[in-house]
Image (cartoon, rainbow, N blue to C red):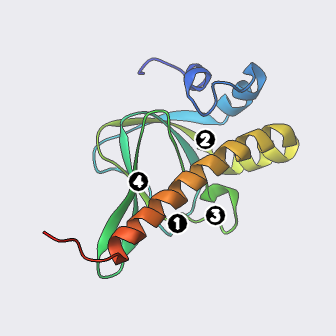
Amino acid sequence: MSGHTPAEILASHPFTADLSEEDRAQLARLARLAVYDPDDYLLREGQPATAFYLIVEGLVSIELFIPGHGPRPLQTVEGGSAVGWSWMLAPSRWEFDARALERTTAVVLDGERLRDLFIEDCCLGLRVVHRLLFVVAERLKAARLQLLDLYGPPREL
């Protein structure tokens, strides 16, 4: 995807492809491309949540640190996925870690500017939030499965 602009990527990314050209253009003005090497963190639990990530290529592990157990993967996401919604809600701090497992390219959208845009264009805001709710639901399902695995009955070897 090198050589492609955020606008071009938004036109084909599953999260934004079916938005209108005008909606995608508004989002593209808030976007930049970023590349993460393996083990680079896109976001860290407890840090300010300042961006929304649309994964273009690569693999990202969504992880939660559990005292006494260390980091636990909740879900692995790949190109076509979205990462991070904490930028939407005060106090805007990440609730989990997201770490690149391989070289990963993402469209990074500025969270503060997105919130401002959604106030100006409530219809676009609603469309994006509706899509984000699907992401939230996926993460909750993944967290539930991890908890069942962590606290469920021991497995027989």
User: Badge 1, how many Cα within 10 Å: few under 14, some, many 20+?
Assistant: some
Label for residue 75?
Answer: 4
Q: Label 2 vs label 1: CA separation?
A: 18 Å
Q: Quadrant of the C terminus?
A: bottom left
Which of discs 3 and 4 lies nearer the camera? The answer is: 4
Q: Give the residue furthest to the left.
A: 157
In terms of sequence position, does the residue under pointer 3 or pointer 2 come before the other? 3
In terms of sequence position, does the residue under pointer 2 or pointer 4 come before the other? 4
* Residue type pointed to by label 3: Ser
In terms of sequence position, does the residue under pointer 2 or pointer 1 come before the other? 1
Which of discs 2 and 1 lies nearer the camera? The answer is: 1
Q: Is mark 2 on a helix, strand or loop?
A: strand
Residue 73 in sight? yes
User: Badge 2, how many Cα within 10 Å: few under 14, some, many 20+?
Assistant: many
**x then y, percent, for residue 130:** 72, 45
| Residue 18 placement, left or right of 126 | left
In terms of sequence position, does the residue under pointer 4 or pointer 1 come before the other? 4
Residue 121 in sight? no
Q: Mark 3 points at which residue?
A: 92
* Residue type pointed to by label 4: Gln
* Residue type pointed to by label 2: Leu
Q: Is mark 3 on a helix, strand or loop?
A: loop
Front residue (pair 131, 157): 157
User: Badge 4, how many Cα within 10 Å: few under 14, some, many 20+?
Assistant: some
